[in-house]
Amino acid sequence: MTWLLTGGAGFIGCHVLRSLRSSGRNVVVFDDLSTGLSDRVPDDVPLVEGSVLDQALLEDTMRKYDVTGVIHLAAKKAVAESVAKPLWYYRENVGGMESVLAAMVSCNVGAIVYSSSAAVYGEPTISPVREDIPLDPISPYGETKLVGEWLTRDVAASNGISWTALRYFNVAGAGDPTLGDPSVANLIPIALRSVREGKNCHVYGSDYDTPDGTCLRDYIHVADLAEAHTAAATLLETEQIGLPINIGTGSGSSVIEVLQSIGRALDGEVAYEVVSRRPGDPPALVAAADQASRVLGWSAQYDLDDMTASAAAAAGLQKI
Ligand code: WQD
């Protein structure tokens, strides 16, 4: 089979690309290079530069390369930006999904792995979260990811497409020092930047109902996440399925535990100060990971120390 990987030049995409290639699959990357980097796509992998809103280009690409499955990662992913620019997020994420699915139907492509997010859960009161709990996203970003799941489910049902939506939890780390996350948008990159600049990292609230009072999240190594896509692709090549799957480790780490882990990676202590809570932060967001293990035969191999050490190495930091 040949897989079309949208967003394959991005931070997560370039890890998925490597995993798919190691499994021996043919891959074509489709990316508008708005945030992706073309030098992360090896020379022998076709790279089509374009927007997922361009259905004609998607169809040309699917036909030219005899694409048989799609892994759709290309999307906007910043929560705060989505609140400021909801129309843009709906256009890019929902419009992009519609365009990808329409191209698939037109070209008879029968399998899709969709990049969804734990943001579809909103602020759940249950932890860990199973895939079948009620969904209540609290940002336009999370809403667009949920609508993307619905679109995929409905179009798949009427066209015999096999699909899964992988709900990513907090993606971190780097599979290689050259493949780090270039954006500084999440806790680990932000903490590493504060270390580099000799500033205190801000901890958003320490009065939550959690063991140390700071928020719990399920951090998942990007290399593990990439393997989950290959496991999903393998399954979709032979099985007709349709369901969302959490991609997390199944255990939570607090903000303080993350900073301590970075301290171990850098042989020192990360300086921090507690500031007020950040609106919209659920106290705990941890995946129930048993469905991934049961359906995909996949489970995380790396732990938090692997994530912080690899992220620090990719950021060029060695010691505090
Ligand atoms: C992690 C924890 C913060 C920064 C977001 C999106 C989610 C997904 C992943 C895209 C929280 C705390 C953070 C800081 C802190 N995005 N924190 N000080 O919000 O769990 O998830 O990214 O798919 O949809 O919502 O990730 O890295 O921002 O925060 O104390 O300077 O770290 O409060 O508890 P989040 P995050």
Image (spheres, helix red, strand yellow):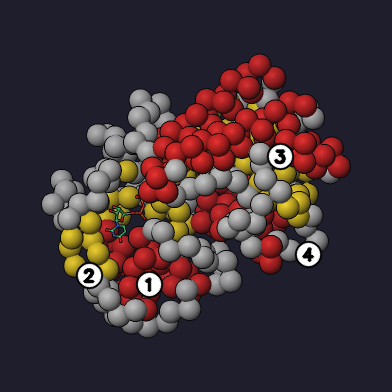
State the residue in front, 41 or 19.
41
Calculate the distance from the C-alpha at mark 4 to the C-alpha at mark 3: 24 Å
Q: Nearer the viewer, mark 4 or mark 1?
A: 1
Q: Residue 311, how many percent across, how many down?
A: 46, 68
Disc 4 and disc 3 in contact, CB within 8 angstroms:
no
Calculate the distance from the C-alpha at mark 4 to the C-alpha at mark 1: 32 Å
Q: Earlier in the sequence, mark 4 or mark 2?
A: 4
Q: Which residue is mark 3?
A: 54
Quadrant the N terminus occupies = top right
Calculate the distance from the C-alpha at mark 4 to the C-alpha at mark 2: 43 Å
Residue type at the position of mark 3: Asp
Q: Which residue is mark 1?
A: 193
* Residue 43 tag number: 4
Residue farthest to the top? Answer: 158
Mark 4 closeness class: few <14, some 14–19, many ≥20 residues within 10 Å: few
Q: Nearer the viewer, mark 4 or mark 3?
A: 3
Residue farthest to the right? Answer: 64
Residue at 64% over, 23% down:
156
Looking at the image, can residue 222 be seen? yes
Is residue 216 shown above or below 193?
above
Disc 3 and disc 1 in contact, CB within 8 angstroms:
no
Label 4 within 8 A of ligand 1 by Cβ: no
Q: Which residue is mark 2?
A: 272
